[in-house]
Image (spheres, rainbow, N blue to C red):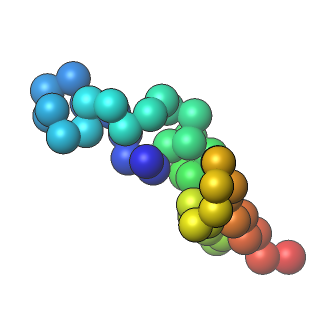
Amino acid sequence: MFERPSIIDPDRRNNGGLGLVIVRRMVQLHRGDIALKPAPGACFRLFVPL
């Protein structure tokens, strides 16, 4: 889900859009992390150190 979609690679063709890829990269640049929580619906855990 956090991988960049690819036209060439059929395994990564329908991984979602670029939004989560961009958000993950921005969070990583701030030395944080984002993950999908096991819950019904779309629920994410976001960590950014102070």
Q: Residue at x 57, y 34 (%)?
A: 19
Camera-side residue: 19 or 16? 16
Residue lying at the far top in this picture: please name it: 7
Q: Residue furthest right?
A: 50
Q: Picture quarter containing residue 4? A: top left
Give coordinates of residue 25: x percent, y percent. 55, 51
Residue 40, horizontal then vertical, whole percent: 64, 55
Q: Taking 7 as reference, is 38 left or right?
A: right
Q: Considering depth in this image, is 22 or 34 the residue closer to the camera?
A: 34
Residue at 57% x, 60% y: name it.
36
Where residue 27 appears, as percent x and y from the top left, is 65, 58
- At 71% from the left edge and 64% from the top edge, which residue is drawn? 46
**Could you tell me if residue 30 is visible in this image?**
no
Residue at 43 percent across and 48 percent down: it is: 1
Q: Nearer the viewer, residue 18 or 50?
A: 18
Q: Is residue 42 visible?
A: yes
Relative placement, left or right, of 44 versus 18 is: right
Look at the picture and state if 42 lies above or below 32. Answer: above
- Number of residue marks: 0
In the rendered view of the protein, which quadrant contains the C terminus? Answer: bottom right
Q: Is residue 14 left or right of residue 7?
A: right
Quarter assignment of residue 8: top left
50 or 36, which is in the foreground? 36
Residue 6 image position (x, y, % from top left): 25, 30
User: Is residue 3 shown above or below 14?
Assistant: below
**Residue at the extreme front:** 40
